[in-house]
Image (cartoon, rainbow, N blue to C red):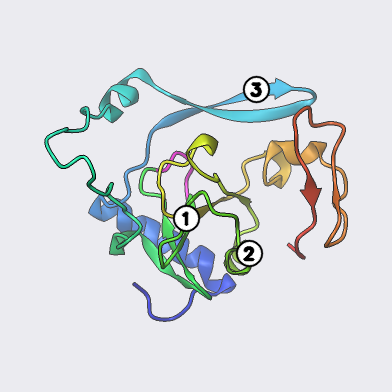
Amino acid sequence: MNAAPLTPAALWPRTLSVTRHALETGALQPIATEARTLPIANTTFQVRVLGRVALKERKRPAPSTAGPSNAEPFNPFANPEPDLVLGDVPPAHVCLLNKFNVVEHHLLLVTRAFESQDALLTRADFDALSTCLEGLDGLAFYNAGETAGASQRHKHLQLVPPLGPDGLRAPVESLLPSLPGPGRVIAAESLPFAHLLAGLGPW
């Protein structure tokens, strides 16, 4: 793991170099998908389709029941694979590549000490995310627990490069109104689901 903290200026070059190395060593195992566009409500969304061959290769054997029933599940973030690590992000996180990425250059921001993925985001989480968004102005998201789609119990935020056309961080961004200043929240009539929007920083 890099001793020097990761800076915004170093994030993207480091992402590219670590990706190249991780592909060479086999530490990074991208999942091959086909990108398709889906127009909905005057917005073009991108979906990723896993082919039958790739799906067959990704099938895993059923978990063994031979071990003790109270055994702790494997935590890949407790000691991240060195070939996937970009570096430390102060005050309390480490940035690494998503080992089984669908989107290229998919980054994870993982707490160094264990925190539950069910926990609310903290000031430290936002500080680390701010550093990374300054270096990669993409789409950041947090799956808060298994119900939200999280596959790991160790708290981790995720960051991917812009996915939408015309440099949009996400296609849905075209439906969003101007965000309010810090401390205020609004809802957008264009989004037909429960949500709140808030401006959090200069990025």
In which quadrant of the rendered view does residue 132 lie?
bottom right
Residue at the far left: name it: 66
Task: Specify whether 114 is left or right of 7.
Answer: left
- Mark nearer the viewer, 2 or 3: 2
Horizontal and vertical percent position of residue 107: 48, 54
Which label belongs to residue 155?
A: 1
**Mark 1 is on which residue type?**
Lys
How many other residues sit within 10 Å of disc 2, few (<14), some (14-19) or many (≥20)?
A: some
Rendered view: 181 above or below 186:
below
**Which amino acid, by three-letter code, is at mark 2?**
Phe
Packing grade of label 3 (10 A; few <14, some 14-19, many >=20) is few
Q: Is residue 161 left or right of residue 16?
A: right
Element marked by disc 2: helix
Q: What residue sits 16% from the left and 42% below the top? A: 68
Label drawn at residue 19 = none
Instruction: Name the secondary structure under disc 3.
Output: strand
Question: Residue sitting at 73 percent across and 22 percent down?
Answer: 40
Percent position of residue 140, x then y: 61, 51
- Which residue is label 3 attached to? 38
Instruction: Give me the C-alpha separation between circle 2 and circle 3.
Output: 32 Å
- The mark nearer the N terminus, 3 or 1, is 3
Q: Three-letter amino acid code at disc 3?
A: Leu
Measured from the top left, where is residue 188 in percent x and y?
85, 38
The residue at the point 41 percent across, 49 percent down is: 153
- Dominant SS type (magenta): loop
Find disc 2 in the rendering and name its residue: 126
- Is residue 152 located in the magenta-colored stretch of the structure? no
Closer to us: mark 3 or mark 1? 1
- Label 1 sits on a secondary structure element that is loop
Q: Give the range drawn in magenta.
A: 101-105
Residue 196, horizontal then vertical, whole percent: 78, 44
